[in-house]
């Protein structure tokens, strides 16, 4: 399927379920881009859940995010319990302008929702010549190290840096061993998950996707991953006034109040710090990495996936196409 046709299909499904055209197009671009980049857990598998949440009012489909300045280089964005993507687009535009002028700027986003692949958001800032960092908290899925019940979300973190005459470096990490969306995608396919991804509700290792979703994800790097999840929680929730992960409702079902999670973004103008030296210095580091055997830059596979989709279109599995078409006809 052509990328533009996939975007139109997703937007049609959302608009059939109480989502405004503006927001539906924003969400559709993000979900299809995730599929193109090989991040299926943040792609077509989300359409039915997003639509159900818009119908139930768990996400406000016609919400218009707004921002206000809090100091010279900080903006506060209220997603107004709508989808995260329009709020993030608003934040990116304002951050780019502020960081270019002031050298550094930050955005605190509250009353938000699932924000998909963070790497895509920071990449947009890097394409404007900025170094960018983003964190997001998500509904509880991991216990603190030594704990016995979920408290933190998978709490992803992403970073991007512009390069001279090359695509930006993009690093996108979930702080669980695997993103929870991949477990949901496995559930939709009716497939088991690899051992080591998650524990069931009794704390036992499981390969059953349903049991994993009802239980706990394991942190990447054990205690270190748990500590990083705490850092993200403080930045994305304490700093923004958003719900903590243990207060947020699920991204996967239509029950309950809006999740109300948060995101925090920082944009830095590298030319303000190092002048023209930044690009040259970064290329020296890249050359050292790529000069070691099979070493590659993080995120390089997304470029291969994009080239393939540009030539062949984006693939949508039959069960997901059926699910989206049913969503349109509800």
Image: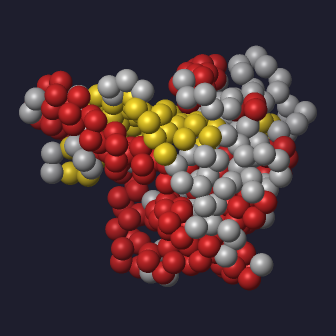
Q: Give the residue drawn at x 68%, y 68%.
A: 18
**On the picture, is 283 further left or further right than 161?**
left
Q: Give the residue drawn at x 54%, y 54%.
A: 64
Q: Quadrant of the C terminus?
A: bottom right
Residue 188 sits above or below residue 324 on the image:
above
Which coloring applies here?
secondary structure
Can you give x and y, in whole percent of width and height, for residue 291 in the image? Answer: 22, 39
**On the picture, is 195 further left or further right than 122?**
right
Q: Give the residue drawn at x 38%, y 65%.
A: 306
Asked if residue 142 shows in the view, the reply is no
* Residue found farthest to the right: 202
Nearer-the-camera pick, 251 or 311:
251
* Residue found farthest to the left: 276
Nearer-the-camera pick, 152 or 29:
29
Nearer-the-camera pick, 79 or 223:
79
Q: Quadrant of residue 178?
A: top right
Residue 160 sits above or below residue 60 on the image:
above
Q: Quadrant of residue 294?
A: top left
Residue 108 sits above or below residue 209 on the image:
above
Can you give x and y, in whole percent of width and height, for residue 133 in the image? Answer: 40, 34
Can you give x and y, in whole percent of width and height, for residue 57 in the image? Answer: 75, 57
Asked if residue 11 shows in the view, the reply is yes
**On the picture, is 98 further left or further right than 325?**
left
Can you give x and y, in whole percent of width and height, for residue 301 in the image? Answer: 40, 55
Q: Give the residue drawn at x 82%, y 27%.
A: 149
Give the number of callouts.
Answer: 0
């Amino acid at each position: 399927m052509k990328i533009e046709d996939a975007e139109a299909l997703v937007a049609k499904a959302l608009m059939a379920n109480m989502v405004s055209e503006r927001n539906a197009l924003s969400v559709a671009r993000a979900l299809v881009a995730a599929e193109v980049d090989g991040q299926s857990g943040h792609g077509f598998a989300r359409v039915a859940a997003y639509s159900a949440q818009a119908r139930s009012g768990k996400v406000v489909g016609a919400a218009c995010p707004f921002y206000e300045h809090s100091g010279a280089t900080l903006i506060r964005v209220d997603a107004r319990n709508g989808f995260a993507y329009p709020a993030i687009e608003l934040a990116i535009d304002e951050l780019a302008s502020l960081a270019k002028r002031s050298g550094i700027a930050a955005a605190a986003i509250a009353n938000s929702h699932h924000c998909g692949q963070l790497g895509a958001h920071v990449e947009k800032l890097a394409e404007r010549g900025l170094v960018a960092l983003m964190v997001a908290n998500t509904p509880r899925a991991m216990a603190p190290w030594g704990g016995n019940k979920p408290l933190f979300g998978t709490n992803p973190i992403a970073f991007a840096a512009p390069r001279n005459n090359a695509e930006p470096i993009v690093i996108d990490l979930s702080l669980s061993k695997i993103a929870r969306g991949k477990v949901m995608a496995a559930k939709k396919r009716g497939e088991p998950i690899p051992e080591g991804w998650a524990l069931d509700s009794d704390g036992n290792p499981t390969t059953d996707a349903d049991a994993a979703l009802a239980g706990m994800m394991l942190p990447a790097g054990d205690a270190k991953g748990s500590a990083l999840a705490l850092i993200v929680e403080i930045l994305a929730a304490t700093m923004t006034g958003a719900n903590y992960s243990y207060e947020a409702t699920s991204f996967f079902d239509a029950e309950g109040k809006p999740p109300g999670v948060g995101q925090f973004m920082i944009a830095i103008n590298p030319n303000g710090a190092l002048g023209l030296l930044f690009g040259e210095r970064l290329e020296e580091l890249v050359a050292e990495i790529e000069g070691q055997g099979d070493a590659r830059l993080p995120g390089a596979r997304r470029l291969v996936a994009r080239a393939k989709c540009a030539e062949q279109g984006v693939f949508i599995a039959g069960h997901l196409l059926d699910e989206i078409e049913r969503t349109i006809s509800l």
